Amino acid sequence: MAERPHLNLIANAEQKMLAETARKLVEEKAPVERLRELRKPEHPKGFSRSLYSEMAELGWTALLIPEAYDGLGLGLFDLVGVLESLGRELAPEPLLTSALLGAYPILEGESEALRQRFLPGIASGDAIVTLAYEEEGLRDYYERPSASITAYNAGYVLNGTKIQVADALVADAFVVTCRSAATDSLAMVLVEANSDGVSIERQYRVDSRVVGIVRFENVDVAEDEVLSLEAVPLFNKTLNRAAVGLSAEMLGAAEKAFEDTIAYLKERVQFDVPIGSFQALQHRAATLYCELELLRSSVYAAAAAADQAEEAFPRLAALAKARANETFLHVAKEAIQMHGGIGMTDECDIGFYLKRAQAAAWSLGNTSYHRRRWAELNGY
Amino acid sequence: MSELESFRMEVREFLEANAPRSLRGTSPSGPFDGYWGGKKHPPVDPDVLKWRDVCYERGFTAPTWPKEYGGAGLSRKHAAVLYEEMRALGLPRPVVGFGFAMIGPTLLEFGNEEQKHEHLPKIARGEIRWCQGYSEPNAGSDLANVQMKAERDGDEFIVNGQKTWTSHADKSDWIFCLVRTSQEDRKQRGITFLLVDMESEGVSVRNIDLISGSSPFCETFFENVRVPVRNVVGQIGDGWTVGKALLQHERSNIGSSIGRQPGSGQRELVEKARHHLYWDGKRLEDAVMREKIAALGMEEEAFQLTLDRVAQKAQAGGNPGAESSILKVVATELKQARYELGQEIAGAAGLGWTGPGFSESDLEFTREWLRSRANTIEGGSSEIQRNIIAKRVLGLPDAK
Ligand SMILES: Cc1cc2nc3c(=O)[nH]c(=O)nc-3n(C[C@H](O)[C@H](O)[C@H](O)COP(=O)(O)OP(=O)(O)OC[C@H]3O[C@@H](n4cnc5c(N)ncnc54)[C@H](O)[C@@H]3O)c2cc1C
């Protein structure tokens, strides 16, 4: 079984400042109640582009991009603090989408042309690239999509349909997982959103995020738009990185739902006393607190491993996401229970957290998926 | 090379030259896992004593204690390096027990010079073994309800009453007690923290069997036991302050002793599963069990990482703070979960009490499984820990 590396789990002064700035900005400009507006059909993007530009100006979109491509060349630990802050208010701005899901496979893929074409734009916030990997009925067999590419002229053609693609309506380009007919293996290619044969339809999801069905019909893919034809390692690395980013958002969200619930326990009076004086509720709150601390350690460790000890990273990424799934869901359900009837109303913000918890738990690997990976990586 | 790194090199050299071969790779080290010492200790492997002696020479049995009391005066950071290096070689801590983990640190904080000089070096050498006289028949979770009486008579107290659940009282030389020296308006007042020599006239001990079949537990009776007043730690009547501080040491030690063996639960369960379930050469065929083991292994890792994070925060000079309050409850419930799952894997093979037809390791595991039920009771039950988290950390109000 695997060795444990030494990981630094405490943020340094710059990292703390970055997370603090993010927290203030999000509290001020992106309170969770915004989602009631953003989820409406007449709001085509589901987030605020101007706020996203502000985030880009603060450098968040550039954090992980190397300096050679106009980025800041920092690590996942830096980004995780920012994502945690965004998560607190369930801010849907596509930072995780573009800075991780889109940028990472381009950065680690085989096409220098794509790096030069997209990374500077992602870093500046002008371009948004997303990952299209979900398909109907695929469950978590991500390595066996039905979408496929076949050789055609000097390049390939792509056919297939992806669903629940994050930020599909605003994306400038999609990184698409597909089967390569030639190698009979997973492949990853990049397709621009305005290419011939690409059509996009909005989906309305329980968590108010704007996602979409993306259909690819005989879409041309040039040789230099191929990220990998033997893409299992690239996909796994991308999934792991993004799963840790999502876990950080989930940590922030769970933390905020918990804080709001504790505040409610102190304020709501029944039987002439605050309900927080009931031991049945106190103990459950204490249990949630323990779970949150364990989640925090797991997320920070995974991010630290990405920056400091790559060999331990896949294991710790699986740990972070599995625990984020469980903990966020547990916190969100208990939060509603402890709010009583008001917690069931659309008017109360706490419900947004349960909806997001469910959606996040089924993105980038569910609990069972990550447990299986953990078992494999530990040799059983 | 940083000062800390050169210290690490120094430690490596020391261990290389001095740690007995026979002890290497034997034990994951924790504060309750090794040589407990004391005058009544049954004969041990001479290497264990040799190991203790070479460490004591350097102050390494109690590395953070000042040199004048038998320690090495190391910072927590340096001590952590020492333990890391011991762990890397699979060496046990040279001296463990309630003296080292509980009364020692408490004396350092509250004891007077005379007490520190008298007791600490003997603890550091493992000469004197200590037990804990807190619980009484009517003072468990409600510890401040202690009734064992100590009446002043000149330079002495006359002690009468009973302690219970006193672990290892039969093997201990001294006992630290909470006794009542006066009745006050609040029961937390009028308690005194008193050190008693078990050889004093009037102290007697009776063993109690546990459900796991062993009997580490005792009732300890005090009949007109004379104890010098100079054995009071802290102020007379203010023993609650001292007693609570000791509980902090006890709980964090229980927490960390479980966490000090990273991945050991998962390893043990996988081993058990390979033995009792179908193994296809590469992995466990039973997908449900496989997932359960993974979930436990993950929780174990998350807990270990939390210990690391708390330690790093403390080393960085920050307050160990709120996070450390969860260690006892998480550690003990995790340990129970591991034994429950082990029993689930073993199935009927885990039902044995003694041979024939049961393997040694299954028999031992079953006893450990039973023993683990105590983890969430001893040292402050899980319910009490959750009360503490709810009130002190989350700031939830008291019941009316
Ligand atoms: C293996 C073992 C070793 C021990 N070793 C020692 C030792 O060396 N020295 C020593 O002094 N003591 C020792 N103890 C005693 C231990 O500290 C007590 O058992 C413990 O404090 C609980 O007290 P109790 O047994 O009286 O249970 P009780 O206090 O009667 O508790 C019974 C149940 O009620 C619950 N309960 C009590 N109060 C509350 C509350 N306010 N809110 C919610 N639930 C509550 C408890 O959690 C428990 O579930 C040991 C115990 C065990 C099991």
Image (cartoon, coloured by chain):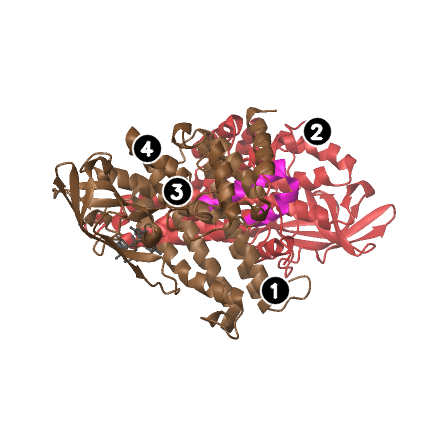
Crowd rating for badge 3 (residues with CA inside 10 Å; few <14, some 14–19, many 20+): some
Q: From what the image shows, is residue B92 above or below residue A60? A: below
Secondary structure under tag 1 reads helix
The residue segment tinted magenta is: A292-319
Q: Circle 3 sits on which residue?
A: B127
First in sequence: mark 3 or mark 4?
Answer: 4
Q: Circle 2 sits on which residue?
A: A69
Same-chain status of marks 2 and 4: no
- In space, the residues marked 2 and 1 are separated at their CA atoms by 50 Å
Same-chain status of marks 2 and 1: no
Which of discs 3 and 2 lies nearer the camera? The answer is: 3
- In space, the residues marked 3 and 4 are separated at their CA atoms by 15 Å
Secondary structure under tag 4 reads helix
Which of discs 4 and 1 lies nearer the camera? The answer is: 4
Query: Which chain is drawn using brown?
Result: B
Ligand 1 within 8 Å of disc 2? The answer is no
Looking at the image, which residue is at 58% across and 28% down?
B5
* Residue B3 appears left or right of A279: right
Which of discs 3 and 1 lies nearer the camera? The answer is: 3
Residue at the outermost bottom position? B357
First in sequence: mark 3 or mark 1?
Answer: 3
Q: Circle 1 sits on which residue?
A: B274
* Residue A171 appears left or right of A339: right
Which residue is nearer to you in this view: A71 or B201?
B201
Q: Circle 4 sits on which residue?
A: B116
Q: Amino acid at mark 3?
A: Glu
Which residue is nearer to you in this view: A57 or A261?
A261
Crowd rating for badge 4 (residues with CA inside 10 Å; few <14, some 14–19, many 20+): some
> Label 3 marks which chain's residue?
B
Q: Amino acid at mark 2?
A: Tyr
Which of discs 2 and 4 lies nearer the camera? The answer is: 4
